[in-house]
Image (cartoon, grey):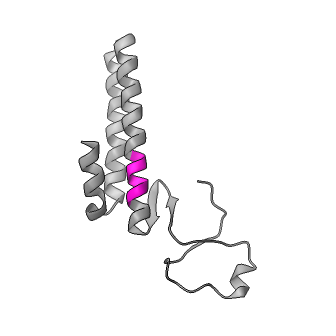
Amino acid sequence: MCLPKVVLLLPPDAPEPPTGLTNLSLKIVRDGLVLMGTGIGTPDFVVAYAAKRAGELLRRADLVTKFGKQLPQPALRLRLLQFINLSLTYTARVTPPSLFREVATNFD
């Protein structure tokens, strides 16, 4: 998601900002945004982003497995699988545990 330089994340039930702020080149988001690979916002947004990220990693793991069966190069295969595990570790570290529990269960 490519965001403008100035983004204002407001809670969904917050009132509309003053008109002076809306005249600026300011993007207002209410559900959430992704910043440095981290979903920030409402619990629903954070869970959806973490689930999307885990799904992407599972698809990547499937591709690596298929590649490994066709061209067995264990060193390359292990390096790529390690990258996938590290990517999920990052997602788990930046997502609140109470929100990540369901995602982790589905990933396992």
Query: Compared with residue 47, is residue 18 higher up or lower down, i.e. above or below?
Result: below
Decide whether the magenta segment is chiefly helix, strand or loop.
helix
The x and y percentages for residue 92 are: 31, 53
Residue found at x 66% / y 65%: 5
Residue found at x 31% / y 39%: 85
The x and y percentages for residue 63 are: 41, 26
**Residue 50, magenta (yes or no):** yes
Region rendered in magenta: 47-53
* Horizontal side of residue 74 vs 18, given as left or right: left
Residue found at x 43% / y 69%: 42
Which residue reaches farthest top? 71
Residue found at x 40% / y 64%: 44
The x and y percentages for residue 66 are: 38, 19
The x and y percentages for residue 37 are: 47, 53
* Horizontal side of residue 89 vs 7, given as left or right: left
* Horizontal side of residue 4 vs 65, given as left or right: right
Query: Compared with residue 33, is residue 30 higher up or lower down, i.e. above or below?
Result: below
> Which quadrant: the C terminus?
top left
